[in-house]
Amino acid sequence: MIAEVIVDVAAYPIDRPFDYVVPERFVQVIHKGVRVKVPFGPRKVLGYVTSLKEESELDEKKLKPIDELVDLKPVISEELLQLSRWLSTQTLSYEIDALQVMLPAAMRATYEKYVIIERPEEIEHEQVLQFFTGRKRVPLKEANSSSLLNLLKQYETQGIVTIDTKVGQQTAIKKEPVIHIADRHVLDQLLASIHPNAKKQIELLEWMKGYTGQTIPRKQLLEQSSISPAVLKAVLEKEGGREELTEVYREPDAPSLQDTAIPVELTTEQRVALEKIIASAEEHRPETFLLHGVTGSGKTEVYLRAIKHVLAQGKEAIVLVPEISLTPQMTSRFKERFGSQVAVLHSGLSSGEKYDEWRKISRGEVKVVVGARSAIFAPFENIGIIILDEEHEATYKQEDTPRYHARDVAIKRAEFYRCPVILGSATPSLESYARATKNVYTLLTLTHRAKEQQLPSVTVVDMREELKTGNRSMFSVELADAIRVRLQKREQIVLFLNKRGFSSFVLCRDCGTAVQCPNCDISLTYHRANERLKCHYCGHEERVPVACPECESEHIRFFGTGTQKVQEEVSKLFPEARVLRMDVDTTRQKGSHERLLKEFSEGKADILLGTQMIAKGLDFPNITLVGVLAADTTLHLADFRAAEKTFQLMTQVSGRAGRHELPGEVYIQTYTPEHYAIELSKEQRYEPFYQLEMMQRKRFGYPPFYFVTLIQFTHEDLLKVADYAAKGVQFLRENLSPETIIIGPTAAAIGRMNNRYRYQCLIKYKNEPKLISTLQQLIKYYRTDWIKSGLLMTVDVEPASIY
Ligand code: ADP
Ligand code: ZN
Ligand code: ZN
C-alpha cells in the first residue's frame, strides 16, 4: 500500500504530495487524514496522509517507508482534506499551510535532534563521554560548545554515534491520576484482614465502600475523604483500588448553567427571518442569508433560535464573531442558552486549552462553536448551520498565508453539508449587499429595534465652526455640555477616538479638505520620510502643501490624536470624572479587556475612552451618551473602502447608546459633516448609503464591480524590487485577458518597512478565468528563481485593505 503524504516543509518545489510505502504493520490501521512521521531527505518530518493507493507511478523500490503513525484516528476529515486542497488553490498557498491552518497550533510538529551512542567503547574524548554520562540518547541541544559539536560530527561520520530527529507535537494531552475503586467484596475482604491499628486505612476503606466500582480523580478523593496520600498509597498496594492516568481537559472557565435565559417572544420581523432560515435547513439547501438588522434589532436572538432548531435535528453549529466582540457578554448568551454544548475559541486561551477545545469538538462532545476566524475550521462532521456575525468585519480575512476569507470558507463548507449560512450585520459589506440585491444571497431585514427603543438621537458637530469661534479644544461646546449633564446625572459616557489611519493624511482645519489625488478621488497618503503625499493606486505624487489648495488657509497639517492626549484633556476639562482608557496599550495584558469592561459595568467609572475596540459588543444600560471625537480619520484613509469603514464604525458606535430604558444621545464631531458616510450614519440609513457608495465604486472601478488581487514585492535593494515588480507586471500583462486592468507597479504606501523596499501591483477584473493559473505560474517563477535574489513576493486575492 502506498500513502500520499503532504510533508511539513514549506518550500518549492515541495508543494505536492510525496509517495511513501505503508509498512505491513500499519496497513490495517492507517487512514486518510492521519499524521505520520516520515523521512524526508536527511531529515525526519511530520506529514499528513492525503490519499491511500495500491501502487505508485514511481519506482517503488526507491520509495521510503513511513516511520511512524502519529494518529490512529484521522485528525482531518475527508471533507476538510478536500477543503484544504480548494483553499490552497484559491489563496495560492502551500498545501501544508492550508492543512495546518485547520488544526490547533498545539498539533504542529516540533523537531528535536538526539545524539545516540552506537559504539561507546570507541569514544576517546573525555568531553564526549561526559556529554553522554552513561546515557544512550541525549538531546543535541545539550551540546553547547562548538568543539563538542565538531567532535560529535566526526564520530557521526565514523558511525560511532548517530543523530536522529524526534518529531513531536507541540502540546501534550493533559493527564491526571484517577482512582478506580475496587468492588465491594474486595473492600470487605480487605477490611476483614487488615490490622485493627491501621485506623486511617480502615477509615478510607469504609469511605471507599460508598463508591465501589467508581472512578474518582485522585485529588478529589484525597480532599473528600480527608486522608493523607500515604494512607491512600498503602490501600492501593493492598489492591483496594487502582491508580491510573487519564486524559482530562484544561477547563478555560467554569461550566455554566443550561437554558437559564428567559425566552422572549420574537418580533414579527424576527419570526419571518427565522422561518426562512429554518425552511432552508429543513430542505437541506446550502443557502446563504444576509441578515441585515439595525443595531439592537435582535439578530443574536435569531441566531440562537436557528441554532436551537439545528441542534434538535442532531446537527452542529459554527458561530463566528470578530475577535474583539468575543466579550464575556457576548459568549455568555450562548452559554446560557446551550450550556456545556458550547465551546468558545478565542485568542485568550492558552495553546493547551485550544487543543482541548478542539478535541471536544472533534469527538462531538460539544455541538456549538463560538469563535473568531479560525473557528470556521471546527472539525464537526455534521454541520447544520454556519453564522458570521458582523460579516463586514475585515478581521474575517486572514492577513498571512493562507490568505483566506472566513465567509468563503463558510459557504464552501455549507455546500458540502447542504446547510444554510447566515451573514449578519447592521452595515453589510458592499460585496454582500450587492450579492443580496442580485439574489445570490437571500436578504432578510430587521428594521426595528427588538425592544422598540428609539434609535439614539445623533448630532453631527461641525468642528470647522468650533475653530471659527475660537474653540481649539478637541471637544466641541455641545459635546462638553452633554458630558457635564451626564456626569451630574451619574449616567455613563463612551468617548470614541477613531484612530485607524492616524496621522496618515493631510487635512485643512478651516475647510475640512483632505488633499486628494487628482486621478483617483482618494486621499493622498502622507510619507513622513520625504514630506511628500503619494497615491498608491495610480502612483501620483506631490509635495505637502503649505496652504490649503481649496481655501488657502495655513491651518493645514497631518491629522491625528492619541487616546492618551484625549485622556489628559478630559481630566483638565472634567476633573471630577473617573475615566477608563481602553486601547492597545491598556489591554495588552491577558484578561485586561474583560477587567476594564467589568469595572465600567459596575459603575466604577463615568467615562470609557477608547478606540475601535469599544465600538461593538458593549451593551450596558447606563450608557446614555456616546461622543465620537473625530469621525474623519477613517474617511480619508487611502483605501477605496474608506467611506464604507467610516459608515460602519459610526453606525456601530452610535449603537452603543440607549440600548435599554434610558434614551441615548450621540455626538459625532467632524470636519466634513456633509460627507454622505457621516450624514447617513446619523439615522443608520444603510440603503441610501449603499446606493451612493456603489456609484463611487462603479465610477472608479472598485469592488464589488471589479474583483481585485494585490501582489506585493519587497527587497532590500530598491532597484531590484522595482525590476522584479516590472517583470511580474509584464508577465501578467502577457498572460491575463485584455479586459483585465493591471495597475502598477507602484511603490507601496509604506515604501520601506524593516529596511525592505515595497512595490505593488493591483489586478482588477470582472471575470478572469486565467487568474489562478497565471498567478500559479508567476509564483512558480518566484519560488524557483526570483526568491534566490532575496525577493519576497506575496499574492493576496481580494485583500481586506491595500496598503
Ligand atoms: P443585535 O444582535 O441585532 O444587535 P441583540 O440580539 O443583541 O441585537 O438584541 C438587542 C437586545 O434586545 C438584547 O438585549 C436582546 O436580549 C433583546 N431582544 C432580542 N429579541 C427580543 C425580542 N423579540 N423581544 C424583546 N427583547 C429582545
Ligand atoms: Zn482649506
Ligand atoms: Zn491616484
Image: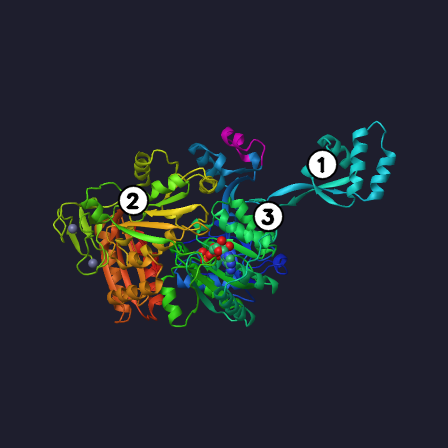
Q: Give the colour scheme shown.
A: rainbow
- Residue placed under numbered mark 2 in the picture: 754
- Whether label 3 touches label 2, CB < 8 Å: no
Q: Secondary structure at mark 1?
A: helix
Using the image as rendered, state which of residue 267 and residue 207 is in the foreground: 267
Whole-Å distance between the Cαs marked 2 and 1? 59 Å
Question: Does the magenta run of residues contain 16?
Answer: no
Q: Secondary structure at mark 3?
A: loop
Question: Does the magenta run of residues contain 127?
Answer: yes
Q: Nearer the viewer, mark 2 or mark 1?
A: 1
- Residue placed under numbered mark 3 in the picture: 256
- Residue placed under numbered mark 1 in the picture: 224
| 1 or 3: tag closer to the N-terminus | 1
Tell me the quarter of the picture where residue 403 sits: bottom left
Residue 735 point in image, percent of width and height: 28, 68
- Whether label 2 touches label 1, CB < 8 Å: no
Q: Is residue 258 left or right of residue 791?
A: right
| 3 or 2: tag closer to the N-terminus | 3
Residue at position x 18%, y 61% in the image? 519
| 2 or 1: tag closer to the N-terminus | 1
Q: Is residue 187 left or right of residue 9?
A: right
Q: Secondary structure at mark 2?
A: loop
- Amino acid identity at mark 3: Ser
- Amino acid identity at mark 1: Gln
Q: Nearer the viewer, mark 1 or mark 3?
A: 3
Whole-Å distance between the Cαs marked 3 and 2? 47 Å
Residue at position x 53%, y 29% in the image? 130
Using the image as rendered, state which of residue 681 and residue 89 is in the foreground: 681
